Image (spheres, rainbow, N blue to C red):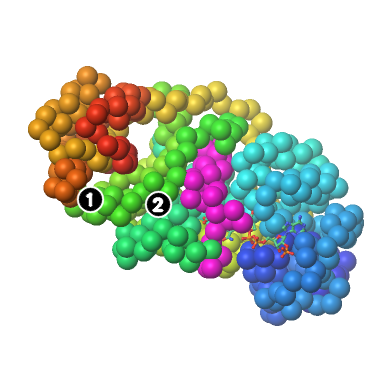
Amino acid sequence: MTSTATSTAINVGLMGLGVVGTGVAATLLRENSPISDVAGRPVNLKKVLVRDLSRSRDIDLPSGFLTADPEDILSDPDIHIVVEVMGGTDPAKGYLKRALSAGKHVVTANKEVMAKSGPELLALARENGVNLLFEASVGGGIPIVGCLMNELAANEIRSIRSIINGTTNYILTRMANQGTNFQVALSEAQGLGYAEADPTNDIEGIDAGYKLTILASLAYRRRFKPEDVYLEGISKLEPQDFRYARELGYAIKSLAISSLDNGAVQLRVHPVMVPNEHMLAKVDGVYNAVEVDGSLCGQVLFHGMGAGREPTTSAVVGDVIEAARKMGGHPAGPHQGAAQNETSISVRPMGNLQTRYYIRLDVADRPGVLAQIAKALGDGQISIAEVLQKDTQPETESAELVITTHPAKEASVQMALEVIAGLPEVRRVSNTLRIEE
Ligand code: NAP
Ligand code: HSE
């Protein structure tokens, strides 16, 4: 593929040349690439926007391609498709609006913008008769966005249970299997190009929350907001939690879950104990997995690389091809993911969740302590399934108690934990995890 445009050629302006942008540029510039054949017309990379022109790059671009001026893309009538892989909301959202308003098709990997402003941008795309495609915003190389829009569209989606942050899953896997310290595992994930510019978004569940907002909006044809998602990160997990989980027959995973019940959907991202034999427990490293339970298809599991240069490039360039095909008069592809008539599905509060719990407490090793804790749980109608006393330390008269419960209501468990934390013999409520069966 050369950069010489023909009368029917499609020209691409790329915004961002970092982990993902470099992969996209290399793929679009590759000699003998099948992209133009599949797209039905030549697809040429024309301009690449970066912030810092002086920075050394992993790729040699033809001269004149690189620019630090967004107008070289946004105001060029010969650029037909804008690919945004800069990240963040500002200035990315403004550039996307400019591109759509100028009649350019847009491909983005930006889950933050799509989660916060997807409906507004999709409406703008519709008004201007162009496509806004965002397959890479969820699940890296896994084609889940297109599947929810098309192949699974006939289903009522009963639930989505997913591992959709590669950085978090990489860290949890390293901590569980090698006992690696949290910070070391995070630095490794950053070095491999998996983490967001601010890794807080990864480890506090914010990135997965954005992705769940996008998936749920597609699945339930309703505009969910990132604030609709209950979030808990992985930073409270300690080595003991992985040890005890293993003893109890579970793996610890951070799951992004949406579940539909009686016309209301609950959206949550938090660490979960998953039975070892469940397929999600076996998803390790940077791999992502999305389990969709649909009324017609039953349970379907998507599994693949959820972050990194090549998998994300696969999704971005796939969208470029789709946009080029549509411009070439090929049959229409997926709908735009912005249902015109929204459903009336509401958001179910987290306090209504009914599930099993794992509770780890640091307590004084004295007679009667367990009875007080059991009373607090009993008063909240929380039934104990198992109690293990671990790591007794005679010198400090302290012991670690691990309690698992039968299914209980989240609000009752949180109230009981407040009571337990206030007992003089309880030194610390060290951690609480929900158990997914
Ligand atoms: P990155 O490595 O940080 O690269 C960002 C690129 O955008 C850099 O080239 C940067 O320019 C450019 N840029 C940032 N702000 C700019 C501005 N104001 N003006 C001009 N250029 C600007 O990011 P990334 O990891 O490739 O991620 C890009 C997007 O893809 C994000 O939305 C991310 O969430 C999403 N994504 C990433 C992955 C992944 O595995 N990394 C996977 C799926 C989705 P300089 O090079 O000059 O600094
Ligand atoms: N930081 C994200 C992750 C990149 O770790 O999954 C892919 O969206």
- Return the residue nearer the eye: 357 or 368: 368
The stretch of residues the image draws in magenta is 191-218
Total labels: the figure holds: 2
* Displayed-image quarter of ligand 2: bottom right
Name the outermost residue toward the left: 367
Mark 2 lies on a secondary structure that is strand
Check disc 2 and give the amino acid type: Leu
Q: Looking at the rendered structure, which numbered label has been put on residue 301?
A: 2
Residue 244: which numbered mark, if any? 1
Q: Would you say residue 193 sits in the magenta stretch?
A: yes
The amino acid type, in three-letter code, at marker 1 is Tyr
> Quadrant of the image for the N terminus?
bottom right
The Cα–Cα distance between marks 1 and 2, rounded to whole angstroms, is 28 Å
Give the class, few, some or many, for how many residues have Cα within 10 Å of label 1's Cα (few <14, many ≥20).
Answer: some
Can residue 314 be seen here? The reply is no
Q: Classify mark 1: helix, strand or loop.
A: helix
Main SS of the magenta part reads helix
Q: Position of residue 121 (x, y in %)?
A: 72, 40
